[in-house]
Image (cartoon, rainbow, N blue to C red):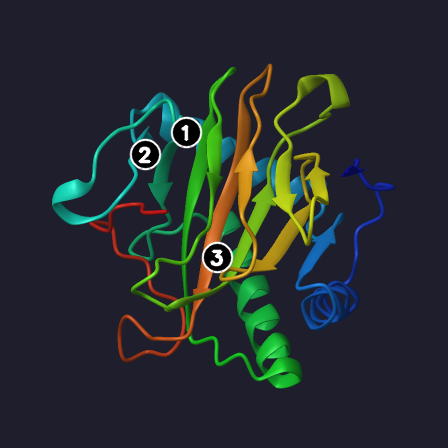
Amino acid sequence: MTASVAAGSGRVLGAGEAEAAIVAGLAGPGFAVVPGFLPEPEVAALRDRALALDRDGALTAAGVGRGAARGGRPEIRGDRTRWLDDHAPAPAEVALLARFESMRRAVNEALFLGLVDLEAHYALYPPGAAYARHRDRFRDDDARVLSCVLYLNHGWAAADGGALRLYLAGDAMLDVAPEGGTLVCFLADRFDHEVLPARRPRLSIAGWFRQTPQTGSGRFTFATDRTPVE
């Protein structure tokens, strides 16, 4: 059985309200869908940044696997990505990272997940592209604890497709429309998920809060030479 989450009411949540919804969802079913996590002007600034990077050729085809086994598999994953870079972040990225830092602290305080850093990238799916069913945590690496996806699309309609499909208990599935400003969070070790094909370009920022720091900072790290892996 498949349930759907459509676009929200257009109301933007305050930071405390959004964080409370995320904590409640993670403590309950293990996931949270939060429409109105960011207001449209901030979403638009991030969307413009992603599209400008893509025009400059800075978004590149994503691969799957790790090490020698890594390679392009467009039949599995068809997006183009670029990791957020802490060397020269755009103002919209700085604001987003501050919001994610506040969220990290709130989740740790309430749920004791031990989240210490974040890796995140822009993802652009051309029309028809998808990402086959998968899970974000590797069998031999438990670093990723919390998966998050923030959508950057404007005026998304049900006919545009491109839903994020979460596989829940039993035969249940949840389809989330990628409407701009909506944030989806879920425990990385618990949920298979996929990106369904869309009929128009589909933009997001995908990220993972980790329980093992990649540097000594204990906060956000963005390595420009890091290769996207799923």
Q: Disc 2 marks which amino acid?
A: Ala
The x, y position of residue 137, in whole percent, is: 41, 58
CA–CA distance between discs 3 and 2? Answer: 24 Å
The x, y position of residue 201, in whole percent, is: 54, 21
Q: How many other residues sit within 10 Å of disc 1, few (<14), some (14-19) or many (≥20)?
A: many
88 or 82, which is in the foreground? 82
- Furthest residue toward left: 68
Q: How many other residues sit within 10 Å of disc 3, few (<14), some (14-19) or many (≥20)?
A: few
* Residue position marked by numbered label 2 in the rendering: 62
With respect to residue 28, does 190 lie above or below? above
Q: Identify the mark at residue 79; answer none if there is no mark.
A: 1
The x, y position of residue 129, in whole percent, is: 47, 21
With respect to residue 168, does 140 lie above or below? below
The answer to which of marks 2 and 1 sits earlier in the sequence is 2
With respect to residue 121, does 127 lie above or below? above
Q: Identify the mark at residue 94; answer none if there is no mark.
A: 3
Asked which quadrant contains residue 58, the reply is top left
